[in-house]
Amino acid sequence: MAISISLTVNGSPVTANVEPHTLLVQFLREQLRLTGTHVGCDTAQCGACTVHLNGRAIKSCNMLAVQAEGQEITTIEGLSKNGELHPMQAAFRECHGLQCGFCTPGMVMSATALAETNPDLTEDDVRRQLVGNLCRCTGYHNIVKAVIQGAAGMKAGATA
Ligand code: FES
Ligand code: FES
């Protein structure tokens, strides 16, 4: 039996009917058509499905849609503002922090949440704290560079 939920997604109120077993990632991709959030494993291993729940990075394959009732969700589609890339997205582009791009939305969402809590990230911080996001292409080096540059860009934007 479907259950009605109300939440905020990328700053807009959303009300929808979901099945009790619908995962948050399924709800975002299949009902809201926010397909920037990817599914790489469905078992909370890869981080491709990472979104923000009230500003905190979470794996949306590991949470039911009904658990998002009343919460605030941000997906990769909600990061850019006024047609401008978020500083973390811009840094991934500038530093070549992606190849196929499959992991990238989840990487960017984890990285932005991380940079919010620690704007002065070191390489060691990034390598340790993004351990829950897997990339099969890049070898991580440029991702680490991108995250450090993106965090600096976020800090500069916050103090501008
Ligand atoms: S799809 Fe959620 S962690 Fe892999
Ligand atoms: S860029 Fe291909 S999986 Fe990361």
Image (tube, grey):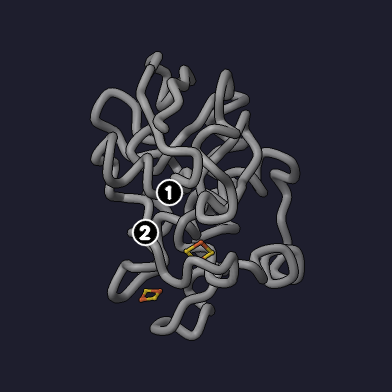
Is residue 57 depicted above or below 107 in this figure?
above
**In the image, the residue with mark 1 has its CB under 8 Å from the nearest atom of ligand 1:** yes
Is residue 33 depicted above or below 81 in this figure?
below
| Of 39 and 85, the residue lying toward us | 39
The kind of secondary structure element at disc 1 is helix
Tell me the residue that label 1 is attached to: 25
Q: Which quadrant of the figure contains the C terminus?
A: top right
- Ligand 2 image-quadrant field: bottom left
Point out residue 55 in the picture as x, y percentages from the top left corner: 62, 33
Q: Amino acid at mark 2?
A: His
Point out residue 86 in the picture as x, y percentages from the top left corner: 40, 39
**In the image, the residue with mark 2 has its CB under 8 Å from the nearest atom of ligand 1:** yes
Point out residue 93 in the picture as x, y percentages from the top left corner: 33, 59
The kind of secondary structure element at disc 2 is loop
User: Gap between marks 1 and 2, in whole Å?
Assistant: 8 Å
Count how many numbered circles sit on residues in the image.
Answer: 2
Point out residue 139 in the picture as x, y percentages from the top left corner: 49, 85
Residue drawn 44% across the image and 45% down it: 22
**Nearer to us: label 1 or label 2:** 1
Residue drawn 37% across the image and 41% down it: 27
- Quadrant position of residue 19: top left
Tell me the residue that label 2 is attached to: 38
